[in-house]
Amino acid sequence: MSRTHRKGSFGASVGTLLSGSAGAMAIAYLAQPVLARLYSPEAFGSLDLFLSIFSLLIPVASLRYEDAMMLPERDEEALHVTWLALILMIVVSLVVALFALLIGDAVLGAGLYGWAIWLAPALFLARLGKIAEVWLTRKRRFGSLSQGQIGQAMATTAVRLAGGMKDAGVGGLIGGFFAGQGVSAMVWVGLAFNNGWQTLPGALQWKKIGAVMRRFRRFPLFSMPSSLLNALVTRLPFLVLAYYADPAAVGYFGRAFAVLAVPLSVLGGAASQVFFVDGAEAIRRGTLAALTARVYGRLVAMGLFPTLALVVAGPELMTVVFGPPWREAGVFLQILAPWLFLASVASALTRVFDIMERQRLDLASSAGLFVVQATALLVAGQTGDVYTIVWAAGIAGAVSRLAHIGLLVRIAGGGMADVLRPYGVWGLRSLPFLAVVALTYRLEPAWVGIVSAAGAGAGYLAALYFHELYSHKRNPPA
């Protein structure tokens, strides 16, 4: 069975993924103002600590072998890689369960007492779903992926709302996360069996699994530690705040993080999935530099205005949407927004390392990111001041991620002008819409500012749409 051929344009494929992601995100976001009033900042802080530990386990679960599923020309070999990832994921989940039973509560602390054991089944479900998701991406079944995303959002939201109304505390938040992982895993696994996994049992051939383990050994040797370091870079501020501050500070940081990082990660994740498929073909055709520049420019165009709008009006928007107790999270958001934006752009472009099989460089760059972020946070942590820690995370993260983007664009064949141009172009185009936000966000009643910001966002999206339409007419896709 040959590998599925390329179908449709990059923009259309990303749009298909985003249509489902937008529905899932709408469900989650519409519930956020209610959840913020049902759960305390301390409960959200405990959830964020749980998710931080969970995020550090994700890269280890299958040693990143699932990403190698995209590279073989034939589906038969990709199925052997699938088995390898599944076997490793089961083994690691069992090891995590054992450690959780022995020392889990001591590691997570009193705020999460009794919840450590749930790390293992959550990890199993998350990675099972991810392996199925990568297979569907290989088969270019982008429309199918949205079903799992929407199911995950609905299950997570429903359980958290129910838990909040019953005053379940952090248990309601973690229970919602677990339910969402379970639903998405079931949906994606079912779809995968309808799109090629029906032959999976016959692919359990130990010699061939051993062969793909050796062939794609760069993934566990370089990509896995690189992913782990990237997870540490993202989650280290949570851990530092948990050590030096109280759970409420972690909760404020987590809500600020989620408000921007979640939608940007949805955009970046959709672009990353399609970029991986198209990039593997583009490198064979010698068009990777052009594809990378196009993807990069679109990511900057779509994410820059909301990032700048939150820098301008973050505290007021958070106060209106989530309630007065969450204004502090809006101040954090102003500081963190540039870092979160650049991190989402870089995350999508890191597929360049896999496409070009430059995993060693991927590891080196991730180590550099970790050293910069860890040094800044540990020095700031010595002050014991929450704002100093947040500023350290924001500045170190933004500077290091911009350098990371420059490296990715460079090795794909671009230059420094390609790195900087999109910010100048879309920064200027966003100015009229930012002016609307800046002039109205403090007006009374508060909803006037919200409506004005939403209108400015809609205007910016319309300008982006017509720019894309004009660009396609001038340069129709091949």
Image: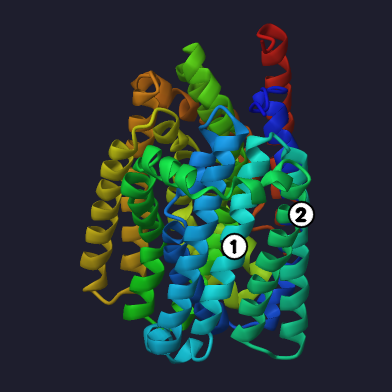
Under circle 1, the secondary element is: helix
Q: List x then y, in percent, for residue 425.
A: 52, 24
Q: Mark 1 points at which residue?
A: 126
Q: How crowded is mark 2: few (under 14 residues within 10 Å), some or many (20 or more)?
A: some
- Residue drawn at point x = 42 percent, y = 41 percent: 211
Kindly tell me whether residue 445 is visible in this rendering. no
Q: List x then y, in percent, for residue 303.
A: 57, 40
In this orientation, which residue lies closer to the viewer: 238 or 308? Answer: 238
Q: How far apart are marks 2 and 1 (CA)?
A: 15 Å
Q: List x then y, in percent, for residue 68.
A: 48, 40
Q: Name the residue under label 2.
A: 190
Relative to 140, say whether 325 is above or below: below
Task: Specify the amino acid type for callout 1.
Answer: Ala
In this orientation, which residue lies closer to the viewer: 374 or 89? Answer: 89
- Residue drawn at point x = 58 percent, y = 71 percent: 122
Q: In this view, does 51 lie to the left or right of 394?
A: right
In this orientation, which residue lies closer to the viewer: 312 or 280? Answer: 280
- Residue drawn at point x = 77 percent, y = 86 percent: 165
Task: Specify the amino acid type for callout 2.
Answer: Gly
